[in-house]
Image (cartoon, grey):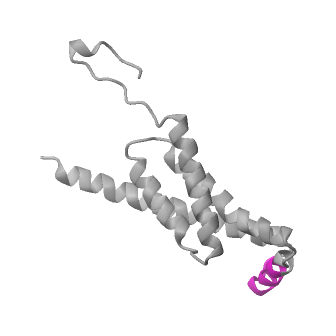
Amino acid sequence: MVKTATQDEGTKVARPGAPGVVLISVFAVVAIAVAGLAEAGAWWLPFVAGVYAGLASLRWKRVVPVTVAAVAIGWALPLWILALLGYPSGATARAIAAFAGLPPYAAVIIVVTLLLAVLQALAGAWLARSVGRAVAAFRRP
């Protein structure tokens, strides 16, 4: 821990960010949970992960970017596995692009899908941070 001065003098001690091990653990747990539950149809899970990251970011600074990256990887992993197994992920993405009026490229829809996961996580983090700070301000005398 980095000190601004000695603790005996009664000065403040600088609060460190989350240690690297915690951030790596958060990344792994979120990516695995999102990947597993996205396969089961839990499309709302990135929002929940964002809410937890927003609450954790009140204490640790870099939790939200790590969670957002893990959500994107977690949603990309099932798409990649389905493509490796021979399922027509690209053809499905092109059909969705045609229905949405977007260019008929599979990569466009896959990027849009991953962007939606990132936006859900960021919206959840924003909501949790704002509510957490409002509650903390309300509790102060």
What residue appears at the point 68 percent right and 57 percent down from the top-left corner? 73
Q: Is residue 97 left or right of residue 115?
A: right
Picture quadrant of residue 2: top left
How many numbered discs, if any?
0
Magenta segment's dominant SS is helix
Viewer-closest of 109 and 102: 109
Give the magenta part as a residue range: 92-102
Is residue 90 visible in this depiction of the protein? yes
In magenta stretch: residue 94: yes
Picture quadrant of residue 138: bottom left
> Percent position (x, y) of residue 11?
25, 19
Residue at the bottom extreme? 99
What residue appears at the point 43 percent right and 41 percent down from the top-left corner? 60
Picture quadrant of residue 92: bottom right
What residue appears at the point 25 percent right and 51 percent down from the top-left corner? 136
- Which quarter of the rendered picture does the N terminus lie within? top left
> Percent position (x, y) of residue 132?
32, 55
Q: Is residue 134 left or right of residue 73?
A: left
91 up-or-down from 84: above or below? below
> Percent position (x, y) of residue 45?
53, 68
136 up-or-down from 76: above or below? above
> Percent position (x, y) of residue 14?
36, 25
Viewer-closest of 62 and 103: 62
Is residue 65 visible in this depiction of the protein? no
In magenta stretch: residue 88: no
Viewer-closest of 46 and 22: 22
